[in-house]
Image (cartoon, coloured by chain):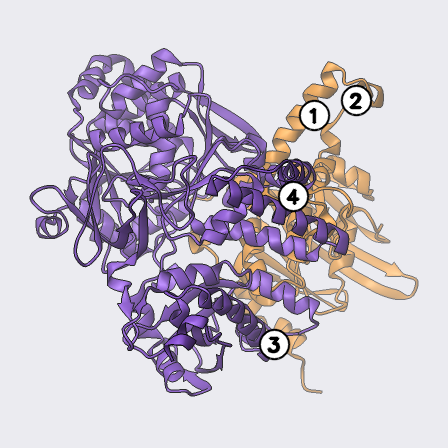
């Protein structure tokens, strides 16, 4: 394991260290024009210094904010290094954000310099420029289509770098001094949290907090500088920055930027990452792709796949339970690995993965077990932007699929009587940017942060997260109700992309279902069902029957657990278009914004509870009203409820 | 239907490649198939770096016109002048060597080959190594392969088709196949690009994409473009000048605005009361 010396407490110091220690080793790889191109640590440090020299000549001050707007590219990370060298705070934004979201982030952080990837991002920035007078300089990377732009704020990355290379020589001492002035307690990054509740908040994290958390996690994962990770999640999310910037800085491993999101799977297969972070959404997509393609495979292949995966599941479950494997199991496991599981891992680009985490949202235990059955060491990780991301994670040899594992070193956990999880850790955020009142509300004087998550700490020290505090409720009869668990179970069904469960204060549980178009349309093709589009397919009785079957199967599973038996989904409605972040019903990380959804689909939800079988949906302006159907799902009366009755 | 394109490119006074002298002049072209007069006494010119459209109703002679420029048909009368050099008759191979590349109305790609290989085929004129050199992988063949691959990768990036680089063409949807065909024509680094109905059969989104790529090609590489299209909306939005044909005769020529208000053109498209 190679974790660098502890006195290196800021990113510029770490970067210089790597440039000297492992200057010729790769820091970032990028696939561009079909070829993987490498940036070594020495080149990265040199490019960052040149950039720093040039942007400081363009007026970047210590403590100022630099926004980064684009996909994962070596240049985005070089810009981040440059900002940190000058003691500025980097503000990575979601590259697919709408203009208004970007405007409010930039205005609230008083950003002075922006690094934008391409013309698309520059267009957004120019549109908001009148609203954001603090912006002095916009640096763009790709110059395609930029020839016609003459705004004086604009400068191309290439020309900036060229200026910087000349300046860097004469400013060498200045840059050294700037980098040395930086201390661990300085603010390093500002993330705008997805804002599942209310508007986005700017979370400020220091160099020391991030580096501390990354060190702890690196030693738990036994990371080495020969490890490789893919940089493919949005840079606006703390998880990507931790795995793509902070941890590489601490350990010295290499990240790989795929050519585009469309080529991610193929690129990942070429690079064979050893360290992998995924959101539940990514894992769901992968698992659905696999099951979809398997369903289309011929009879023999399909049977082989099913039996091999069954062996994988059994072996994974036994291993997790700490049981010894019989010789028969071992042989079956080896055979299934040779026939199906190994090749499948290879297709998914995961044959070299040593440590994989899923984070960012609740993950269904079945989904986790799917990957573990494949032979991938996928573990849950719990944390949020405010808590420096690493709060708890599952440990090898002590993995329980329904928990998020044990707290990591330095983290103290406490439960309030209302079961809210409180965290105290060296990785906590410093403040909500420019909002002392909110900071004080979230973090008390003793340094305990209110996560807003409801959970339980088991006797074995394992943390189980139930749901968001705000979403935990109870049915009319008093049975506790947590929607997230139901939704993540629903989303594991290949035909369901997104689901919203309702039940708080009601006498039964109902759900809005958003179908997965790719899978459902293929299913429809096989059934010879013709349809004109998403809305038409979603309203088909055949599709309702399909979803009803899936929900019935899930209800049967729920019925076997006395605590969940009354959370069975009784009625459902299929939405005629997909839930999307652009409509404001999801956050940029894909979490549900329940208040917005509840308001927008009030009529549909009321109709489900009124016992109606049809509802007229009046959507936003400019769209036609449509009828949506409501259907009942089969509910299983469990032994538990029967006894109660 | 309206297709929105970036107006800054169209109206910009500072074009990256300002119009040059006529690069291609067609004078008094007449083409007959037996007794059928496909083209009658047609003359027009194409300026360097402009986007020139040929429009007209079905059977107006648009494709015949393109085939004459391309050298597939030899006209009975008239002459073609390319860069001041008078050519009595053009041959397809000669046209290619002069730097005239084209796409086809009915996609003509190698269906079983990958996107990459298809576009690589467009580099034919830039490959000089002999069969033996390639077979033995001698230095010149290897160097050329690398250079050509780099050029092809630039086009793949330009047309945003990285994700289908290795996919066989037959498996692609129609809109993407059209884009690959454009890529293969671009691979020849043409001075004039002939596009035969580049947007036929596409949905609105695909048309918008194609419009953007055509404008980008013209803006980025300075390629002169001659295109045939019967979708008036598209043509008026992206071309600098338009020739209108009807029954093999030229009935209009000028900027989109001039052509739009020309009574002959209106009659040809909307019909005249008899």
Residue B159 in view, yes or no: no
Q: CA distance from mark 1 to mark 3?
A: 54 Å
Q: Nearer the viewer, residue A379 or A171?
A: A379
Q: CA distance from mark 3 to mark 4?
A: 43 Å
Q: CA distance from mark 4 to mark 1?
A: 18 Å
Q: Which mark is residue B145?
A: 1
Mark 2, other Cα within 10 Å: few <14 / some 14–19 / many ≥20: some
Q: Is residue A430 above or below residue A215?
A: below
**Residue at 58% over, 76% down:** A545
Q: Which residue is mark 3?
A: A542
Label 1 is found on which chain of the structure? B
Asked if marks 3 and 4 touch (Cβ < 8 Å), the reply is: no
Q: Which mark is residue A25?
A: none
Q: Which residue is mark 2?
A: B134
Q: Which residue is mark 4?
A: B183
Asked if marks 1 and 3 touch (Cβ < 8 Å), the reply is: no
Mark 1, other Cα within 10 Å: few <14 / some 14–19 / many ≥20: some
Residue A460: % across, % down: 31, 43
Asked if marks 2 and 1 touch (Cβ < 8 Å), the reply is: yes
Asked if marks 3 and 2 touch (Cβ < 8 Å), the reply is: no
């Amino acid at each position: 394991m190679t974790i660098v010396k502890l006195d290196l407490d800021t990113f510029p110091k770490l970067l210089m260290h790597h440039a000297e220690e492992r200057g010729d080793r790769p820091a970032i790889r990028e696939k561009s024009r079909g070829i993987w191109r490498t940036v070594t640590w020495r080149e990265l440090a040199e490019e960052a210094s040149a950039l720093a020299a040039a942007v400081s000549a363009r007026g970047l001050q210590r403590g100022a904010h630099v926004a980064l707007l684009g996909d994962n590219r070596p240049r985005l990370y070089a810009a981040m290094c440059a900002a940190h060298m000058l003691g500025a705070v980097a503000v990575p934004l979601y590259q697919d954000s709408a203009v208004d979201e970007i405007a409010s982030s930039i205005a609230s952080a008083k950003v002075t310099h922006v690094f934008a990837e391409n013309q698309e991002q520059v267009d957004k920035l120019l549109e908001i420029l009148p609203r954001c007078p603090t912006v002095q300089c916009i640096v763009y990377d790709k110059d395609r289509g930029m020839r016609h732009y003459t705004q004086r704020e604009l400068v191309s990355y290439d020309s900036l770098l060229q200026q910087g290379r000349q300046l860097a020589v004469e400013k060498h001492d200045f840059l050294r001094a700037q980098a040395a002035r930086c201390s661990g307690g300085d603010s390093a990054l500002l993330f705008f949290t997805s804002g599942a509740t209310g508007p986005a908040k700017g979370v400020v994290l220091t160099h020391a907090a991030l580096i501390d958390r990354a060190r702890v996690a690196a030693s738990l994962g036994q990371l080495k500088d020969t490890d490789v990770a893919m940089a493919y999640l949005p840079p606006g999310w703390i998880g990507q920055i931790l795995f793509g910037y902070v941890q590489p800085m601490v350990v010295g491993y290499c990240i790989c930027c795929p050519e585009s999101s469309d080529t991610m799977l193929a690129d990942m297969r070429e690079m064979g990452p050893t360290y992998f972070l995924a959101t539940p959404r990514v894992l769901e997509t992968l698992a659905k792709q696999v099951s979809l393609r398997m369903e289309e495979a011929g009879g023999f292949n399909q049977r082989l796949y099913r039996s091999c995966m069954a062996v994988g599941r059994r072996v994974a479950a036994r291993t997790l339970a700490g049981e010894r494997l019989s010789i028969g199991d071992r042989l079956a496991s080896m055979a299934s690995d040779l026939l199906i599981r190994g090749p499948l891992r290879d297709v998914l680009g995961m044959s070299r993965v040593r440590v994989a985490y899923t984070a960012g949202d609740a993950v269904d235990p079945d989904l986790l077990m799917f990957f573990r059955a494949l032979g991938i060491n996928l573990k849950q990780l719990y944390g949020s932007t405010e808590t420096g991301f690493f709060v708890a994670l599952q440990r090898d040899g002590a993995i329980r699929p329904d928990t998020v594992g044990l707290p990591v070193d330095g983290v103290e956990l406490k439960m309030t009587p209302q079961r809210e999880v409180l965290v105290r850790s060296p990785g906590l955020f410093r403040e909500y940017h420019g909002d002392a009142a909110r900071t004080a509300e979230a973090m008390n004087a003793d340094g305990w942060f209110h996560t807003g998550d409801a959970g339980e700490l088991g006797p074995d020290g394992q943390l189980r997260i139930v749901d968001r505090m705000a979403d935990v409720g109870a049915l009319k009869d008093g049975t506790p109700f947590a929607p997230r668990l139901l939704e993540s179970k629903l989303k594991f069904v290949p035909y369901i992309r997104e689901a919203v469960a309702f039940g708080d204060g009601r006498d039964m549980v109902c759900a809005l279902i958003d179908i997965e178009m790719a899978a459902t349309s293929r299913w429809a093709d096989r059934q010879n069902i013709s349809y004109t589009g998403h809305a038409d397919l979603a309203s088909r009785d055949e599709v309702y029957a399909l979803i009803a079957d899936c929900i019935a199967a899930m209800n049967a599973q729920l019925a076997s657990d006395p605590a969940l038996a009354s959370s069975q989904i009784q009625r459902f409605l299929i939405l005629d278009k997909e839930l999307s972040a652009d409509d404001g019903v999801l956050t940029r990380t894909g979490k549900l914004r329940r208040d917005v959804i509840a308001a927008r689909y009030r009529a549909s939800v009321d109709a489900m509870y009124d016992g109606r079988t049809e509802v007229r949906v009046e959507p936003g302006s400019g769209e036609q009203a449509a009828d949506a159907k409501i259907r009942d799902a089969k509910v299983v009366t469990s032994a538990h409820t029967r006894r109660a009755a | 239907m309206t297709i929105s394109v970036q107006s800054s490119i169209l109206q910009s006074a500072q074009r990256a490649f300002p119009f040059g002298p006529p690069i291609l002049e067609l004078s008094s072209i007449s083409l007959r198939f037996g007794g059928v007069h496909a083209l009658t006494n047609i003359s027009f010119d194409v300026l360097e770096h402009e986007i020139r459209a040929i429009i007209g109703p079905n059977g107006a002679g648009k494709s015949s016109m393109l085939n004459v420029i391309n050298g597939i048909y030899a006209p009975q009368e008239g002459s073609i002048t390319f860069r001041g050099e008078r050519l009595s008759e053009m041959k397809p191979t000669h046209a290619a060597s002069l730097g005239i590349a084209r796409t086809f109305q009915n996609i003509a790609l190698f269906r079983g080959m990958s996107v990459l290989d298809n576009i690589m085929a467009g580099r034919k004129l830039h490959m000089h190594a002999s069969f033996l050199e390639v077979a033995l992988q001698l230095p010149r063949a290897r160097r050329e392969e690398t250079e050509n691959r780099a050029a092809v990768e630039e086009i793949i990036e330009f047309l945003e088709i990285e994700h289908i680089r290795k996919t066989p063409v037959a498996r692609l949807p129609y809109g993407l196949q059209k884009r690959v065909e454009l890529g293969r024509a671009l691979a020849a680094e043409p001075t004039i690009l002939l596009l035969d109905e580049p947007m036929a059969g596409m949905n609105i989104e695909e048309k918008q994409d194609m419009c953007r790529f055509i404008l980008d090609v013209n803006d980025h590489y300075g390629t002169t473009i001659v295109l045939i299209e019967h979708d008036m909306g598209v043509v008026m939005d992206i071309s600098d000048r338009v020739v209108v044909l009807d029954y093999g005769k030229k009935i209009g020529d000028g900027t989109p605005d001039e052509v739009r208000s020309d009574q002959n053109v209106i009659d040809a498209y909307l019909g005249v009361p008899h």
